[in-house]
Image: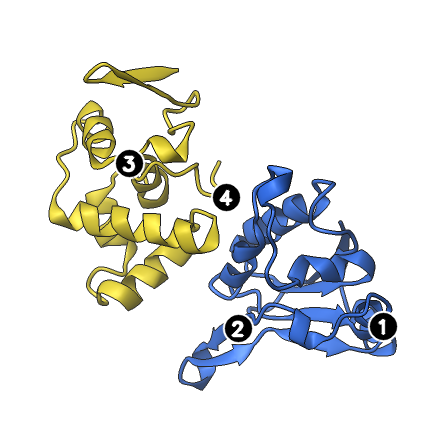
Amino acid sequence: MAFEIEGKTYETDEEGYLANLSDWSPEVADFMAKEDDCDLTDNHWEVINFLREYYEEYQIAPAVRVLTKAIGKRLGKEKGNSKYLYELFPYGPAKQACKYAGLPKPTGCV
Amino acid sequence: MGNGAKKFMYVNRRAPYGTIYALEGLEVVLIGAAFDQDVSMAFVDDGVFQLKKGQDTGESNMKNFSPTYHALGDYEVTKLYVDRESLGERGLSQDDLMELTYEDEDDDYKEKPSIRIVDRKELMKLMEEQDVILNF
């Protein structure tokens, strides 16, 4: 599968995750979010940027449990809970946010 | 750990690259960590190379997944047993291994080392205590 932004083609897997990590740009995240009828706010970007940093450091996308805990530690308790994260990313915080962040599907997600 | 948690040990025996075992084994550990069991990992034979510091896969065109071992603490996998004899036989010591730590929730989130070097006898005893042993 693939999509196009301003003449550039982006390859994805069958679930819409970016095939090449290095293709990512903020425009890619915006485009993917629009497809899901989701407008990215600063709160979304906090999580997306966090995921990209986590991947950079550990070479994996964290499981949702790990993400929730780490977000709480980094951004404060009121954000480190599944209610907050599911409100931002109703399709599942790890899955949906990782997709927008250009990461592969989290290890252990089915 | 709740009642009924089983003791799982993942035994890693192979070098990190060249076969897919080490990477697949690590992924199984990360996935399995979601199930709230009592998880440990053992590194024996060439498996000790998986924890070697300063891995560089640049020329082999393989993904260097060694940074992922640093995430194990986040997944509450905090017991990494390394066989002392296997290290010695390969001219390695603890100083050659990555420094892996976890935060102990029960002790004010203090950072503690995850790697424990054990003798073969201790490892045997640990293996005997397990409910499930998976080899990679």
Is A23 rendered above or below residue B44?
Answer: above
**Which is in the foreground here, disc 1 or disc 4?**
1
> Both on one chain, marks 3 and 2?
no
Mark 1–mark 2 distance (CA, rounded to whole Å)? 22 Å
Instruction: Bin the neighbour count of mark 4 within 10 Å (Cα to Cα): few under 14, some 14-19, many 20 and up.
Output: some
Residue drawn at 34 percent across, 62 percent down = A70
Q: Is any part of residue A65 visible from this angle?
A: no
Q: Chain of mark 1?
A: B
x, y percent for residue A60: 47, 48
Density class for disc 3 (Cα within 10 Å; few <14, some 14-19, many ≥20) is many
Element at badge 3?
helix
Q: Please state which amino acid type lies under the numbered disc 4.
A: Thr
The dot on residue B85 is 1
The three-letter code of the residue at mark 1 reads Glu
**Number of the front mark, 2 or 4:** 2
What subunit carries mark 2?
B
Dot 3 corresponds to which residue?
A: A100
Please state the horizontal and vertical placement of residue B108, each as a whole percent of the image.
40, 84
Q: Which mark is residue A107?
A: 4
B104 left or right of A86?
right
Q: Residue B71, position in %: x, y?
A: 49, 60
Q: Residue at x 43, y 37 (%)?
A: A105
Q: Is residue A75 left or right of residue A65?
A: left
Chain represented in blue: B
Label 3 to label 2: alpha-carbon separation: 30 Å
Q: Quadrant of residue A54?
A: bottom left
Q: Quadrant of residue A23?
A: top left
Give the Cα distance between marks 4 and 3. Answer: 16 Å
| SS category of the residue bearing label 4 | loop
